[in-house]
Image (tube, rainbow, N blue to C red):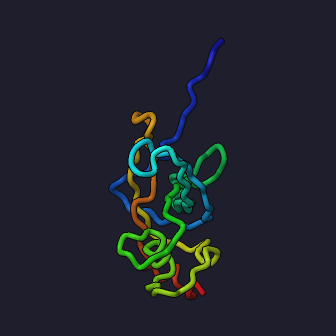
Amino acid sequence: MQFVTEDQPDLSLSEDKIYRAVLMEIQPKEIRWTPDKGKNAGIEQTKILLEWWWEVQDESLRNPATGELRRVKGSCEARITNGADNRFRCWAEALLQREIGVGTPIDTDDLIALPADISIRKVPDRKDPAKVYDEIAEVLPVYDSAYQSEPPF
């Protein structure tokens, strides 16, 4: 058998760069685990996360085989709070470019297709630390007039 070496473009994302991205979808994901220590040892636990899928708006990251732009995921708890470290609220505020007060309802459909600037962090796989994945580290508001012709809603 013979094989020909193909050119594989580098579509990796850098941790020291800010990328313009558009939120493409938010999907719930249920995770289950059984702790082996503590008061809940042996009792199955469940948590709902939200997976936020972003499309990086950089033509150099377009896959030549499929024509698709590079996508990257970020996850957060499926609840929004006024806590300083609540990713859902922080990311939604960046997309909407306004603060979200306690009691304010947020519909994830209103966030889809909005732009933001994102940064990346490299996360090693839990089972195989040699594998490293790109994940959203931070979501920042876009301060570019081309994206602000109309308010989000």
Give the quarter of the figure containing the N terminus. top right
**Residue at horizontal 41 percent and vertical 51 percent from the top:** 39
Quarter where residue 84 is shown: bottom left
| Residue 102 x, y percent position in the rendering | 46, 86
Q: Nearer the viewer, residue 80 or 13?
A: 80
Q: Nearer the viewer, residue 120 or 77?
A: 77
Q: Nearer the viewer, residue 34 or 92?
A: 34
**Residue that lies at the very extreme toward the left in this rendered image:** 16
Quarter where residue 6 is shown: top right
**Residue at horizontal 61 percent and vertical 78 percent from the top:** 107
- Residue 7 lies, with reference to residue 120, above or below; the image says above
Give the quarter of the figure containing the C terminus. bottom right
Quarter where residue 108 is shown: bottom right
**Residue at horizontal 58 percent and vertical 75 percent from the top:** 111
| Residue 73 x, y percent position in the rendering | 52, 56
Q: Tell me if 11 is positioned left or right of 63 in this view.
A: left
- Residue 55, can we see it? no
Q: Nearer the viewer, residue 26 or 41?
A: 41
**Residue that lies at the very extreme toward the top in this rendered image:** 1
User: How many marks can you see?
Assistant: 0
**Residue at horizontal 54 percent and vertical 36 percent from the top:** 8
- Residue 139 lies, with reference to residue 69, above or below; the image says below
| Residue 15 x, y percent position in the rendering | 36, 53
| Residue 51 x, y percent position in the rendering | 56, 59
- Residue 45, can we see it? yes
